[in-house]
Amino acid sequence: MIEKRTIAPDVNLWHEKYVSCPMCGAWFVRFELSYDAGSVAPTVGETITGAGGCTGVVTAYSLDSGTWAGGDAAGVIELSGVTGSADFLAYVDNEALTGSSTFAGTADGQAIQKNYGHRIPYSQAVQRDGKFWCISHHNFRFNKKDRDEAKIRVEEID
């Protein structure tokens, strides 16, 4: 059964629920934090804590210049689950960073929130087969199937 969600005009859109389309991909948030003066490499899964109280879990990192042994390593760390941030920004320039297991360095600017995937407002999603689809992917995937099911087949009997 095809069920299209609609929203009543008096519903507050600031509190609307969002869903992900299986073809668009799940929506998720990551923060990218530039660092310098790194003396020990981070490990994936490690929690990075700033002097200001922001924390985040390392999902990936890169070494763009310098060396860990020389204490001048610089690059970018990708963090998930960042807490203590406000207005899509986290950490502060020249803030001391420490890791839960290995990392030590200094923030080189603020971490910036990056949004990946596609968020679909509940009012603009179509639910079918237990999943939510954006309208364009729903039409792409099910339009032919719906047309084929709608055909009436009449067979002649002798």
Image: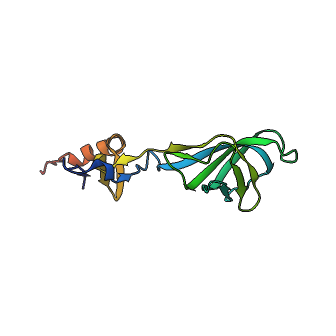
What residue occupies the far right of the structure in this picture? Answer: 69
- x then y, percent, for residue 113: 54, 44
**Scheme of colours in the image:** rainbow
Q: Is residue 149 left or right of residue 78?
A: left
Q: Position of residue 45 (x, y in %)?
A: 67, 59
Residue 36's quadrant in the figure?
top right
Residue at the outermost top position: 65
Does residue 34 appear to the left or right of 38 in the view shown?
A: left
Position of 58 with respect to 125 (left or right) is: right
Question: In front here: 136 or 149?
Answer: 136
Whether residue 16 appears in this view of the structure is: no
Instruction: Name which residue lies at 25% across and 43% down.
Output: 147
Q: How many marks?
A: 0
Is residue 83 rendered to the left or right of residue 78?
A: left
Query: Residue 11, image x and y in percent?
Result: 23, 51
Residue placed at 74% from the left, 62% from the top?
A: 101
Can residue 156 be seen from the camera position used here?
yes
Q: Residue furthest bottom?
A: 101
Dividing the image into 4 quarters, which one contains the N terminus?
Answer: bottom left
In the foreground, 142 or 115? 115
Query: Is residue 50 positioned above or below 101 on the image?
Result: above
- Residue 158 drawn at (x, y percent): 12, 50
